[in-house]
Image (tube, rainbow, N blue to C red):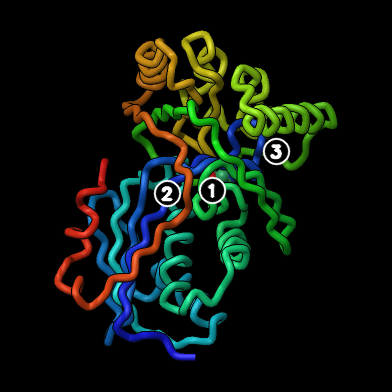
Amino acid sequence: MTADQQQRVIVKVPASTANLGPGFDSLGMALSLFAWIEMGAAERTEIVLHGEGMDGIPTDKTNLVYKVAQQVFDEAGVSIPELSISMYSEIPLTRGLGSSASAIVGALAAANRLAGDALSRERLFEIATRLEGHPDNVGASLYGGIIVAAWDGERAAAIRLEPHPELEVLVAIPEFHLSTDKARHALPAGYSKADAVYNVGRSSLLVAALASGQLEMIRYAMQDRLHQPYRAALIPGMERILAEATEHGALGAALSGAGPTMLALVDRRSSRKQELEQFLLDSLRQHNPAEARWLTPCLEGPVVTSLDASQAGTTFMEWIKGEITA
Ligand code: HSE
């Protein structure tokens, strides 16, 4: 099989939040914050990173997007060893908003299109989960909406739920980086039966609440004993937010992924949004600078556009600039 050497694709892929409180490594939601990746065959590999905050990301063949793309080509049986790649991301890095998962999913989707859509979405999900180590962020970025997922090291299984139409998401992003590795190292090696049962109950209730639209149950269901208590020391202000956000108008609050971003689910009809935003920011800003963003669940995964010859003159940044919000 050969690839179309002229083909150029642009992928728009959503950010994600993982865990949603009790669903450690199993629940995720795609968010209306995006990364874009352009990819095409080239004579010599060139990787261009646009925008801020990309310092330290390699621009040679050790680049994650390049390596993920080659994995797709290998499996699809096509050869495109030299790639032209451009990237822009409005998803802050190492803040718990799934930036690496978005890069992986964007790379998979772009490369798969260049390979003639040889791999199924299920296969892309398995590859992405293996690369990321857990299915929650990649599942959300790949399927959009809310994802309920399980991974046993061999098989990745997921079911997508449609988010309630009135669900809005407030994220408060502290101005410091926290690597997933560090936040995972804070977790204990084992848990008591009581804590395991606590989380099974809360996580199951949360899935049922989200699936059935019983938003008032989120307050009770969005509680966790598996990861948040152990990560609290890494995120000053987090404990207060988890304890009090519902008194300021949130449906529920959680650490976004491994943090440090804090997330509140909100009924978009609420009259207390300003109060809630202020509360989250005040809680974090007692310790670190922080900014807030109002987002919505993103309903779809990557959107892949194949550019034709007539669009050859349009640069990557010209193509996406109308869509960038951050
Ligand atoms: N489920 C993962 C964790 C998400 O909490 O470590 C990391 O983004």
| Circle 2 residue | 14
Which residue: 53% across, 13% down? 246
Q: Confirm or deny contact between disc 2 and disc 1 (CB under 8 A).
A: yes
Inspect the image, locate mark 1, and give the three-letter code of the amino acid beneath it.
Answer: Ala
Inspect the image, locate mark 2, and give the three-letter code of the amino acid beneath it.
Answer: Pro
Reply above or below: 237 against 155.
above
Inspect the image, locate mark 3, and give the three-letter code of the amino acid beneath it.
Answer: Pro
Horizontal side of 282 relative to 219 (left or right) equals: left
Badge 2 or badge 1: first in the primary sequence = 2
| Circle 1 residue | 140
| Circle 3 residue | 188
Tell me if I can see residue 278 in this picture: yes
Farthest bottom residue in view: 1
Q: Quadrant of residue 155?
A: bottom right
Which quadrant of the frame does ligand 1 lie within?
top right
Q: What is the crowding at mark 1: few (fewer than 14 residues within 10 Å), some, or many (at least 20)? A: many
